[in-house]
Amino acid sequence: MALPIQEILTGLSLGSRYFLVAIGLSLIFGVLGVLNFAHGALYMIGAYVSLTVVQNATGNFWVGLIAAGLAVGAVGAIIEMGLIRRVYDRDELDQLILTFALVLIISDLTRTVWGSGNQTMATPELLASNVQFLGTSYPAYRLFVIVVGFAAMGVFWYAIQRTYLGRLVRATSSDRDMAALLGVNVPRLYTGVFFAGSFLAGIGGALAAPMQAFTPALGDQVIINAFIIVVIGGLGSFTGAFVGAMFIGLLQSFGVLVASGVGQLLPFLAMILVLIFRPEGLFGGEEQ
């Protein structure tokens, strides 16, 4: 009984980290219409910023976590104002090429600053032990990551569905020109959305840092999984991003029990099935 529960918790922990990347990717696409290939690189920056703040400045993981979110959010806002804004009306291929170029630039800058070797960061002392949960002993830090993922979904849903700012975001995503005519400062709103999506990616990277050794290639696999998630959930769907992230996390967690490599194979099979039978994604077109 303990093994399935541990695998479920591991899957939810993976899914929570994926969700923080996929929700930003889905938000930026849903509002701005830009498929940001550089989102994984922003996730990677979050891990490095957190590491630097913890090891070279404050020694406090929580300060590093917030600093990573704010720093990556600021980087995202600068990218949006300086580069992305200039290709909103261009072909989608131009946007993909631009964001792919950003991946290469950010990765090379990271290697220059931090090097190419493996980096590790200790688990915060408060969450360094195991706790008893549902009859099994499980790392407290991974449970904390699950809580962050579910809390992020709740906060995000409330902000988008129940607040004035959320209504502005939804209205602008539906008709940018009409929103501008009604007085919405669309460029500022777009920058804010890009900041929010990047902030979440930075938080995701900072949360991943104590769980694995990482290099400048950290964002490569994450962005692949994030694309699989938004394809399965539906591009621009926040609910789809959450369900897709948890689904992929569980597939990977249980897949390793079958055979080596199956955990990485199953998400691709799931994506192919969705593309064949429901190309708009499981939740595509359902959210307004």
Image (spheres, rainbow, N blue to C red):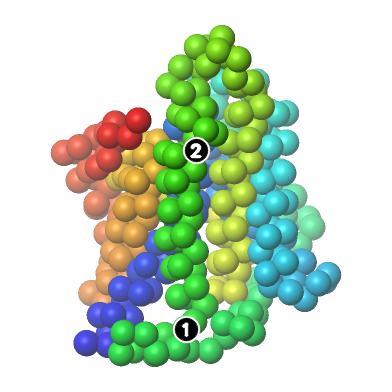
* Image: 122 above or below 107: below
Labels in figure, total: 2
Q: Quadrant of the C terminus?
A: top left
Residue 287: x %, y % from top left = 33, 34
Residue nearest the viewer, comparing 116 with 81: 81
Residue nearest the viewer, comparing 82 with 267: 82
Tag 1 residue: 139
Q: Does residue 260 show up?
A: no
Residue 17: x %, y % from top left = 48, 61
The answer to whether 268 appears left or right of 201 in the picture is: left
Residue nearest the viewer, comparing 195 with 34: 195
Q: Residue at x 30, y 90 (%)?
A: 135
Q: CA distance from mark 1 to mark 2?
A: 36 Å
Q: Residue at x 65, y 32 (%)?
A: 191
Tell me, for residue 34, which label it has, or none: none
CA neighbours of label 1 inside 10 A, class few (<14), some (14 to 19), many (20+)? some
Residue 1: x %, y % from top left = 22, 87
Q: Are marks 1 and 2 in contact (CB under 8 Å)?
A: no
- Which numbered disc, 1 or 2, marks the residue that appears first in the sequence? 1
Q: Does residue 63 show up?
A: yes
CA neighbours of label 2 inside 10 A, class few (<14), some (14 to 19), many (20+)? few
Tell me, for residue 163, which label it has, or none: 2
* Image: 61 above or below 221: below
Q: Residue at x 46, y 60 (%)?
A: 151
The answer to whether 108 appears left or right of 38 in the picture is: right
Residue type for callout 2: Thr
Q: Residue at x 33, y 52 (%)?
A: 244
The part of the image, by quadrant, that contains residue 53 is bottom right
* Image: 245 above or below 161: below
